[in-house]
Image (tube, coloured by chain):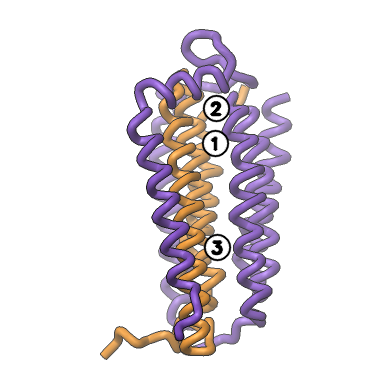
Amino acid sequence: MQLALFIIFGALALGGALNLLFQRHPINSALSLVVVMMSLAVLYWSLGAEFLAAAQVIVYSGAIMVLFIFVIMLLNAGKEERTKGSRAAYTVGFPGAAAIFCLLSFVFLSERGALKSSNIGGDLSNGLDNIAEVSAMLFTRQLLPFEVTSILILVAILGAVVLARKEQ
Amino acid sequence: MVPTAYYLILAAMLFSIGIAAFLIKRNVITIFISIELMLNAVNLTFVAFAHMWHQVSGQIFVFFVMVVAAAEAAVGLAIIISIFRTRQTLNVDEIDLMRS
């Protein structure tokens, strides 16, 4: 069952990512990214990270992508046109990305013996459920980073308001 | 049973597609979208390793990456709006104020 889930949603994520790459209009790219994020949420769930699957749907495909689509519509972004810079980027970009992919998959496949297989569902350290485990870690040992992120979010909100404000 | 290496290779594929999109796209919003794709690919790697080692720390990392990505998206899109307001374009070839 996990293999079927992996194949279906992995192919969906890959198709969404390729569609993001080949579409010319930003709104199509943004909507294909939503497809990628939703299929990644299913893969997180099958890896036993239920909390992250929910957070992926709510934070990424809910909040962040709505923000992106708002800005695309607000700025009325049209199709991008081919320029001289884009032709140079084509000759460098595809071979470079392919080289990085080949290097990474070579490392992963040659170390395949050390990497185990994964069963469906959560079986982390103490047999608690996933949310209990994440929250126990987050509110005890990682409490300071967790509180610092709230300050980070506050600064980001202030920065966004200041940057996007109309200048007098 | 799925080998962890398959998840890692899927993440590598998504990451390389993100790199390619980052390099060939000329629209600043699409470039930003491909950065989000790369962040997602790295998150998948973290979750796969967390599952492999039976440790929850990798999932905590993904949580913090999500928080930082949300903050980054808010600030970045505000910067894009203010660039568009001053220069009336989203094409990165025409936003070359820092090139002397």
Please tell me in which quadrant of the rendered image residue A48 appears. Answer: top right
Please tell me in which quadrant of the rendered image residue A140 appears. Answer: top left
As shown in the figure, which amino acid type bears the numbered disc 1?
A: Tyr
Q: CA distance from mark 1 to mark 2?
A: 7 Å
Instruction: Compare residues B60 and B18 and report the one nearer the observer.
Output: B60
The chain drawn in orange is: B
The chain drawn in purple is: A
State which tag comes first along the sequence, 1 or 3.
1
Q: SS for tag 2?
A: strand
The N terminus of chain A lies in quadrant: top right
Q: Which residue is mark 1?
A: B7
Q: Residues within 10 Å of mark 2 (few under 14, many from 20)?
A: some
Q: Which residue is mark 2?
A: B3
Residue A140, relative to residue B87: is it above or below? above
As shown in the figure, which amino acid type bears the numbered disc 2?
A: Pro
Residue B51 appears at what percent x and percent y? 50, 24
